[in-house]
Image (spheres, rainbow, N blue to C red):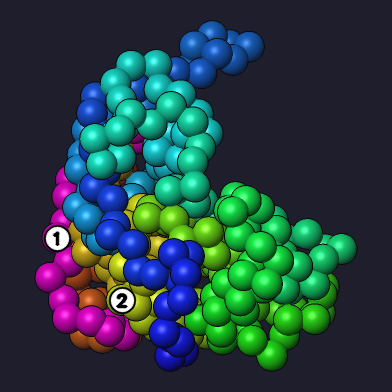
Amino acid sequence: MTEPEPKMPELIVEPPVKLVVDGVTKRFRTEDGEVEALGPVSFNVKEGEVLCLVGPSGCGKSTMLNIIAGLEHANTGKVLADGNLVTAPGPDRMMMFQEHALFPWLPVLGNVLFGLKLKPKLNAKERLEVAQFYLKLVGLEKFEKTYVHELSGGMRQRVALARALAPNPRVLLMDEPFAALDALTREQLYGDLQQIFEQRRKTVVFVTHNVREAACLGDRVLLFSSQPGRIHEEFKIDLPRPREINNTRLTETASRITHALKSYTNLTKAGGAA
């Protein structure tokens, strides 16, 4: 996964973005009334930091990610990207979902090229060069003409990653992208993803239910409480990279986060039963 010498802005390693989440709340209207999903939530993400959000189902992690992406609007509070107010999706922030969301009628190369429509100043030759660059980065340069149904689950997520990286965003938002994959495939992707993060220097917000995954990939982990979602506890992951998922120190770190999550969950259940 060695990179060629950059020839255009889309291949240059752009400075990553600092994110500020300030007092964000989110409510949804349902048939049973109004549900308070988030907040208030406040946190910062440093330039080039990998921040993982962990918590029980329904705690608002994905909602928080959608607000950072500009796909949803907060009821109160704000999100800033390098001091600029986030009000809508933008090419500086790209999202990678649990489902790969690839187009089955397009081959691998076509799917990555589709993401480059956000770069209208590129000509056809330049788009091809950029798409091939990122396919090589994720190790799929030999599968340009392959269709989605011919790929394994891990390969599909690699294509989705290449598509998200191709417009050269400064922030990458990842919503449980490996949840549906088997353990061996995930383990391989953890190593590849750490290498890509090091090479491309993105600010990353990563949502996951998998505590060990968070400890492997994150520089920090925020543990969210359940509805309404708030930050319950913060963990700094001070481990050298690259990290192996079965490393003893990583396992110990993951165990501490798991213990905190279980303790909070049990406390919540006891409170609800009282």
Residue 68 in picture, x, y percent from top left: 40, 38
Q: On the image, numbered disc 2 is attached to which residue?
A: 198
Q: Secondary structure at mark 2?
A: helix
> In the depicted view, which residue is nearer to us: 128 or 75?
128
The residues colored magenta run: 226-245
Q: On the image, numbered disc 1 is attached to which residue?
A: 236
Q: Main secondary structure of the magenta part?
A: loop
Q: Quadrant of residue 211?
A: bottom left
Q: Is residue 103 visible?
A: yes
Q: Residue furthest top?
A: 33
Q: Secondary structure at mark 1?
A: strand
Quarter occupied by the C terminus: top left
Sequence-first tag of 2 and 1: 2
> In the depicted view, which residue is nearer to us: 136 or 264?
136
- Amino acid tagged 1: Lys
Residue 148 belongs to magenta span: no
Residue 109 in picture, x, y percent from top left: 72, 73
